[in-house]
Structure formats: structure tokens, C-alpha cells
Amino acid sequence: MKNMKYYGIGRRKSAVAKVSIINRNTKMEMNTIIINNKTISDYFQNDKDALESIRQFLTLDIPLNTRIQVSGGGITAQKEAICLALAKALAAKLGRPACVASASDPMSTDQMGFSNILKKKILQKNLFTQDSRVKERKKYGLKKARKAPQYSKR
């Protein structure tokens, strides 16, 4: 159990994030998040909202050493894809898949020793909901997806 890795994949628009959570017995420091071989503050330089939404995972009292590979989309889409992938990887680390996880008995622990209180925190933040909206394609004869040229009667 020294080198256990937990994986999660998140998607938003055209952004894809692949997260791997590594056990704390590795050479990395505690609670480090590395995105595309950069620290989180270097990757999201001026986007404070992105930093806060990803750092909410550090408040769960779980040691996280994560490596994230992100490609495609813009900064906001990448941030949302990372959040979904982190939630899925945490669900794998906590011992149950995201669709089966429940927090009915908050005092019990699962086979890995994590309490259901942590699962309940993850479920309460709605981190498993995936937003599947994408930009609608442009149709021929129109200026945009639905914007038509001005009608001329004569």
C-alpha cells in the first residue's frame, strides 16, 4: 500500500483533466497539487476563483499529493474539469465509486479507514455533477448558431 495511486477523469466542454492521487509515502510534499508540471499558483496565475475552487479539496483533512494533466478548453473549463476529476479520484480513494457513495451513517468507517463524514462533505458540495453543455455549432445560411441575417422585404 506504499505506492497506491487513485485516478479520476473529468471533462467540461473540450477540456479534459486526468488526475492521479499518490499516497503520502512518496517523495512529494504533503498536499501538493501539480498541474502540467507546474504548481497550482503558477498554472492559474491571476485566476483566484480557480485557486479557491481547487483548494477546497485541501480542507477535507485528507493528505493529497496530486498530479494533474489538463488539455483543451479555456481556463474556466479546465478548472471545472479538474474539480470533477479530483472528486472522482477522491471517491476512488475513499473506497467507493461516486455513484454508490452515500453518507447514511456518519460514524462508521469503510474498509480503508476513512470516515463517512468525509464522504458526506464531498457529496454536500455537489462535486460529482458534470456540466455537459457545449457551444452549439454554426449552421449554414446563418451568421451564428441561431442568428439569422436581417430579413429584407424588397
Image: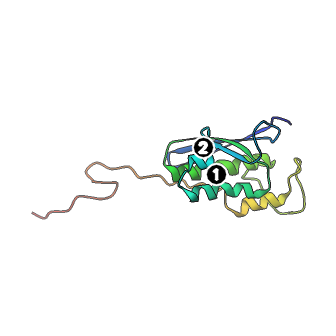
In percent of the image, x 79 and y 36: which residue is there? 26
- The answer to whether 28 is drawn above or below residue 62 in the figure is above
For the residue labelled by badge 2, is the local secondary structure a helix, a strand or a loop? strand
Q: CA distance from mark 2 to mark 1?
A: 8 Å
Q: Nearer the viewer, residue 69 or 7?
A: 69
In percent of the image, x 86 and y 63: which residue is there? 106
Q: Which residue is mark 2?
A: 17
Mark 2 in CB contact with mark 1 (< 8 angstroms): yes
Tag shown at residue 97:
none
- The answer to whether 148 is drawn above or below residue 66 in the figure is below
In percent of the image, x 70 and y 43: which residue is there? 66
- The answer to whether 73 is drawn above or below residue 120 in the figure is above
Count neighbours of disc 1 (C-alpha within 10 A) and say few if under 14, some if 14 to 19, many if 20 or more.
many
Q: Which residue is mark 1?
A: 84
Count neighbours of disc 2 (C-alpha within 10 A) and say few if under 14, some if 14 to 19, many if 20 or more.
many
Image location (x, y in percent) of residue 50: 58, 55
Image location (x, y in percent) of residue 128: 66, 55
Q: Quadrant of the C terminus?
A: bottom left
The amino acid type, in three-letter code, at marker 2 is: Ala
Image location (x, y in percent) of residue 103: 81, 61
Q: Quadrant of the N terminus?
A: top right
Q: Nearer the viewer, residue 103 or 23?
A: 23
The amino acid type, in three-letter code, at marker 1 is: Leu
* Residue 4 can be seen, yes or no: yes
